[in-house]
Image (cartoon, helix red, strand yellow):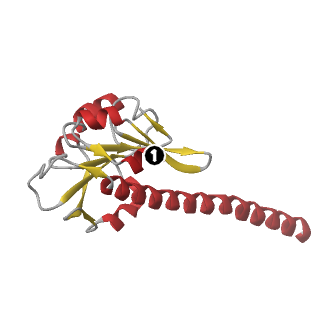
Amino acid sequence: MRRPFSITALFFLLLILTAAVPLSARAADEQLENKLKAAFLLNFAKFTTWPEDITGSSEFGLCLVGTNPLGGSAEQLSGKLIGQKPIELRMIKKIADVGLCEMIYISPSAEGGMAELIAALGGPSRLTVSDREGFAAQGGIIELRIFDNRLGFIINNTRAKEDGLSLSASLLDLAKEVL
């Protein structure tokens, strides 16, 4: 009688262990992806030229829209310099609270349809970034996307110019697609 119990217990132990490994691997992959996205955001800001003194603020406003965008990896950006301005992170739950933001990251968890978000958040001198599929094609400026297991991006340079932003040639060259 004890033998079937031991085999059953061993089977369940192996089942639990094999189920846990992919979960922890996925969590590690998600954490790495969030760190990469945060690094991309920093470089997008560094390789973008805004009109002179657009906000009059002494900080560079980076607004993060959605619940837990970037899983906490965004904190590494706080205080980094964009030009002469330190980045100030602002977690935004409602679109109306965007205020003075030079750059806005819209996470997949942000509420609302894409067209409404872009219309509400976009505007003169605001760099909008998201990893929602179709973001750039629908009027956002930079869309983060996975290409062949690598993080890449699509740029809507037409929209960037309309909004008074100038993206560096280096950034445009690195894009997988420029609209």
Q: Position of residue 156 (x, y in %)?
A: 37, 35
Looking at the image, which residue sits at the far front?
169
Q: Position of residue 106 (x, y in %)?
A: 34, 44
Q: Secondary structure at mark 1?
A: helix
Please, what is the three-letter code of the amino acid marked with disc 1? Asp
Say above or below: 94 vs 3: above
Quick check: 118 left or right of 70? left
Comparing 74 with 1, the one in front is: 74
Q: Position of residue 116 (x, y in %)?
A: 28, 30
Specify few, some or many for label 1: CA neighbours under 10 Å numbering under 14, 14-19, or 20 or more. few
Would you name the residue on which mark 1 appears?
173
Q: Position of residue 33 (x, y in %)?
A: 50, 57
Quick check: 172 left or right of 29? left
Q: How many marks?
A: 1
Looking at the rendering, in which quadrant would you find the C terminus?
Answer: top left
- Residue 61 seen from this side: yes
Say above or below: 107 vs 33: above
Comparing 171 with 57, the one in front is: 171
